Amino acid sequence: MIILTVFVLISVSVPFLVTHQPDEADISKRLAPPSRTHWLGTDRVGKDVYSRLLYGSRISIKIGLVAVAGSVLIGSLFGLLAGYYGGQIDNLLMRGMDILLALPSVLLAIVIVTILGASLTNAIVAVSIVYIPQYARILRAAVLKVKELEYVLAARAVGASDWHILLTVVIPNCLAPLIVQATLGMGSAILDAAGLSFLGLGAKVGQPEWGLMLRDHFTLIRQAPWTVLAPGLAIFSMVLGFNLLGDALRDILDPQVKTT
Amino acid sequence: MTAYLIQRLLSMLLSLLGVSILVFWMVHLIPGDPALMILGERANEAALQELRQQMGLDQPKAVQYARFLSDLSRLDLGRSFRTKGLVAEEIGRHFPPTAELTLAAMLFAIVFGILAGVISAINRGGFWDFATMFGALAGVSIPIFWLGLMLILLFAHQLDLFPVSGRLDALLDLEIERRTNFMLLDTLLAGNLAAFADAVWHLILPAVTLGTVPLAIITRMTRSSLLEVLNQQYITTAYAKGLSQWIVVGKHALKNSLIPVITVIGLEFGYLLGGAILTEHIFSWPGIGSWLLKAVEARDIRPIQGGVLFIAALFMSVNLIVDLLYAYIDPRIRIQSAAV
Amino acid sequence: MKRLAFLTLLLLTFTIGISHAKPRAFIFGRGGDSVGLDPAHEEDGESFKVCESIYDTLVQYQDDSTEIEPALAESWETSADGLTWTFHLRRDVDFHDGTSFDANAVLFSLNRQHDANHPFHQVGGPYIYWTDTGLAETVDQISRIDDYTIQITLTRPYAPFIYALTIPAFAIVSPTALKKSGEDFTNRPVGTGPFSFVRWDRNEKIVLKANKDYWGGAPGVDLLIFRAIPENSVRLIELQNGSIQAMEFPNPDDLPLIRQDPDLNIIEQAGMNVGYLAMNMDKQPFGNHKVRQAINHAINKNQIVEQLYQGLGIPAKNPIPPNMWSYDQTTEAYTYDPGLAKQLLSQAGYANGFKVTLWALPVPRPYIPNGRMLAEAIQSDLKQVGIQTEVVSPEWGTYLEKTKNGEHDMAMLGWSADFADPDNFLYYLLSKSSAKKPAGNIAFYRSDAMQSILDQARTETDTTIRTQLYRQAQALFQKDVPWVPLAHAKQIVIARKNVRDLTLHPTSFKYLRHVKIKAD
């Protein structure tokens, strides 16, 4: 929680905290070790690692938020429809989800990004698509459980519309597992997007994205370890932050599995 | 049980058909001319035309898909245009290294995961519990491509304890006939113990890299499901009978808490196949992941189609096996799904 | 417990490993595997690298220069009109499969590429080099005079012809083996070269063994193994640990480490290549001559090359490399002068700069080891004079497709010599006729003057006159500046100290037959 608060604060106030512009290169000062002017040293073309790391936190949080929001929205919609209406719709949607689930997520994401072209936006889209089935399943399971509850049956008996029931009764009841999963999903999304960037399928040359920074400096680990350690630790701690938060939320919101 | 199996197999076949359509269209949506990709900087129009024609790329898409399906029904995945090799053969050659790596990673994860989970559950609330749980959380948060390089740097380079990459010392390899391309098996079949030891030695770092995430997940799962069991009546009874903690946990609780762990293990296989792509890349491991990545980069259509389908089929089969195992252990599942 | 088991394993490895004599093996680490080993169909360097040790060509380069010397052809004559070439073949050569080499083998190897009606023409894919080097058009007929004499007739005089014959794609293959294996020949190659094929574990290694009866003398090692290790830094660690004996393509930034390592030698050789930044003259503002000059002045080429190549390259000023004959030493390089660049821009009407795309090579190529890093440096220099760039770097296939079709504003690309003739660079990269899409001339530089110089030089057979013409071409290039010529990369191999007689060659990979390994 604390880690995350720090990250969010940092990403909001980036312009005040940085010492250099993230794309300001001075090739004569490349691979300089940490010093008073460059707190975390410089990278392979002489850009300031510390400033790029800070700008990168914005990108990573954005990746996490957008990707998760995308898969939560679409996944929930699918899950709701499938769970609530059942029958053919359920069959069709869930079969589709099964097909997506039949492929390892990294592989699927690679293929999707290759089709759409390598860019950060497309990496986000790919990660989003990959995680849709998870949310669809959670929502569907929750809807199935809620649907048979007495007050839902009652609401339907009084003639409430489907949408009304979905919005006022079903959704609020499914929120808890969804929030937990989404928080944990932020971590996975950030990791996956970084992995794509690492394979050269994400951020564009020069963008201060952590996965890309790792890719670009991997080979320099022996000469300039700070260029590799810094973004690696940054990814690690941000993902750890989301996972800790997710765990805590699960304990609070989901009493059934409190023992975890 | 048989009815259940047949039902599952049918639905798997249907899903595979879905995957085949998905894969075919996805591959053909990939921008970049495969013919140009093969020819490189020196491509000229005449050579391009000729190659496209040979590759069947000048045919309408529907014709291409029909041809793909009809070949597929005869289990013929075609030939790669880049390497000229039969795709089925290439899968046969590249799958064993991945399987070997995946199984080793899984073994590592299961042994240490269950061990850590038990330790953590027994010491619930204590220091070791906290340490293991934090370690497990860290394990799922670490980028594995980063972990892999750190391990190489530390253990292979600085300490010089392990080989850096590859599967076997190049010279030892010459003495080994690749019958199965499972290196451990081949070296044993050849009766060459030195080579076997060398193969194990090469396997350790990549397996640890790949196994870290499942290790963390299995640890957590073991802990939570063990705790749940430990809270139940009969355990309390066992304690009341004066049995020692190790006997209670080892004999009664652990067995019952393993069911959810098995599910997780099954699910993790899918993750491993994906994670293997990154691990293989870093350790120059000639498995199906790096093979497929190369095919995607090269826009080599047939290997992509064949490879993705193969992995999907494999993944589904693993899931099926897990479900069967599950149904075998817990009869309630069988009845439930039969009812659906 | 684990450690104990591990130590036992170690011990076991050692004791058993020592107990029998090892063959002398030279293991060469490289960045990627070969695509195929049927030379006629290959295009990439990784394939040729191995092919050159398995096969021979009719003529080859001398070990230490780009002069031609006899190989499978002992001698040859040209008719006075330059149209008929007669080759006398070596009589004592066998293929690795035991069949003997003669005129029929040459005819088979070349006619399957040339003659569309040849029974094996359709086998294995297109013949990229045959069409690309112009041989497809210039060669009229290849015929047999007797068992050890063949004749090639040309449709028109073609000066680079004899140089072109050194290209490994035109190596002589065993007809018997190819007829037997068909398409699969690429996976079980048979030639006459210093090494014969043993086995290929794809994406791992290719194993060759010495051909003791090689006509040029038996090679210095028993086994030659090419291992594919994609990560440059991992490859270096393998070399330092001694599990490979030599490697190529180190990261430029690893060079200081390598120089410090007492076990390693750096072996280098000027490469015959050029890396350049093409400005698409079909698009504004690059149609404007002053803008192109401004960009040449805005990029701090010397510093970039010094810093990013770390001594692995030299800054370029001409479109051909310094070790190519006819290279013009006197060309005056564009100086780094951002002030002048700004001035030129405002004269051209772009005082406030402009925004363009900068295409960065997505894969390491011999001429530009790291395109993305180079792009970041150029991006920063151009920003200084007010030019905003968006770096675009799609994967390799798309990159080639789109640059050949002129979708870029500025794009990096390069060229490595197929053979030592300036025509091989200039005609493909800068003639008007290769500015047709899909283009080799991706600056879309359409100069009639350049075209006529290059056409003339191509058919002229007198080397002095050709040198004059290529000097003119360089002067014209300097004036019109369709590119920013960036760098000529050096070839470099890092070897362990016990490796002897490893000397590189600017265009050939044949030298591995001389390598010896001294016992430590």
Image (tube, rainbow, N blue to C red):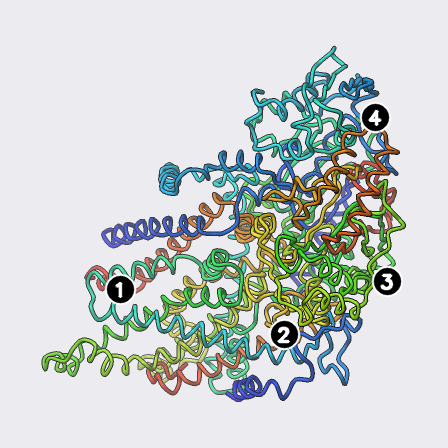
Mark 3: which secondary structure? helix
**Residue topped by disc 3:** C260
Per the model, the C-alpha gap separating discs 4 and 3 is 41 Å
In the rendered structure, which amino acid carries the disc numbered 3? Gln
The chain containing the residue under callout 1 comes to B
Mark 2: which secondary structure? helix
State whether residue C153 is above or below residue A72: above
Q: Which residue is drawn at 77% across and 19% down?
A: C85
**Residue B313: horizontal and vertical position, in percent?**
39, 51
Check if mark 3's residue and mark 1's residue have beta carbons within 8 Å: no
Per the model, the C-alpha gap separating discs 3 and 1 is 65 Å
**Residue topped by disc 2:** A231
Q: Residue at x 78, y 19 (%)?
A: C87
State whether residue C469 is above or below residue A55: above
* Disc nearest the viewer among 3 and 1: 3
Mark 4, Cα crowd under 10 Å, few <14 / some 14-19 / many 20+, is some
